Amino acid sequence: RQTPLGAARDLAFTLPRQDLQQARQALDPLLQQWPGAKLIPGGPIARVSAVGAGMPCTAGTAGRMFRALADAGINIAMIATSEIRISCVVAQEDGEAALRAVHHSFGLEG
């Protein structure tokens, strides 16, 4: 399917704040190719992940993680997945609470 001309497109990624200037330099030639394109740095974040080799054959892992964060009142800003990992980006101030909520939902307290 083709995207209509002029439609917005977003690309998001995370990197350490100290690498922002290097990222700007690397992305500048690409941004110049697209009129109106810009790099918008976000605020401080935390990333919480569920990782396990058995995840491809364990249904409901993502839903369980998302529910734990929602029940804790934590907003998910970004989600990334792979065969063995589900990662959620949350506000930095919610990082520890997010980790506790996910640990609790999978019975990993202690």
Image (cartoon, helix red, strand yellow):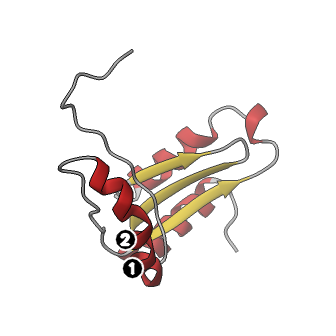
Residue 27 x %, y %: 40, 62
Callout 2: SS: helix
Residue at point 54%, 67% (across, down): 99
Residues at marks 1 and 2 touching, judged by CB atoms closer than 8 Å: yes
Q: In the shown orientation, is residue 47 left or right of residue 59?
A: left
Q: At 28% across and 55% down in the image, what residue appears?
A: 32
On-image quarter of the C terminus:
bottom right
Count every numbered label the image shows and give the total. Answer: 2
Nearer to me, 51 or 99: 51
Q: Residues within 10 Å of mark 2 (few under 14, many from 20)?
A: some
Locate residue 16, reporting x and y percent: 48, 77
- Tell me: 75 left or right of 4: right
Spatial distance from mark 1 to mark 2, Cα to Cα?
Answer: 5 Å
- Residue 8: x %, y % from top left: 23, 37
The answer to which quarter of the image holds residue 39 is bottom left
Image location of residue 26, percent across then percent down: 44, 67
Task: Using the image, tell me which numbered label, if any, was put on residue 24.
Answer: 2
Quadrant position of the N terminus in the picture: top left
Residue 50 in view of the camera: yes
Eyeballing the image, is 20 above or below 103? below
Amino acid at pointer 1: Gln
Mark 1 — residue?
Answer: 21
Give the number of the disc on residue 40: none
**Where is residue 2, by image quadrant?**
top left
Kind of element beneath mark 1:
helix
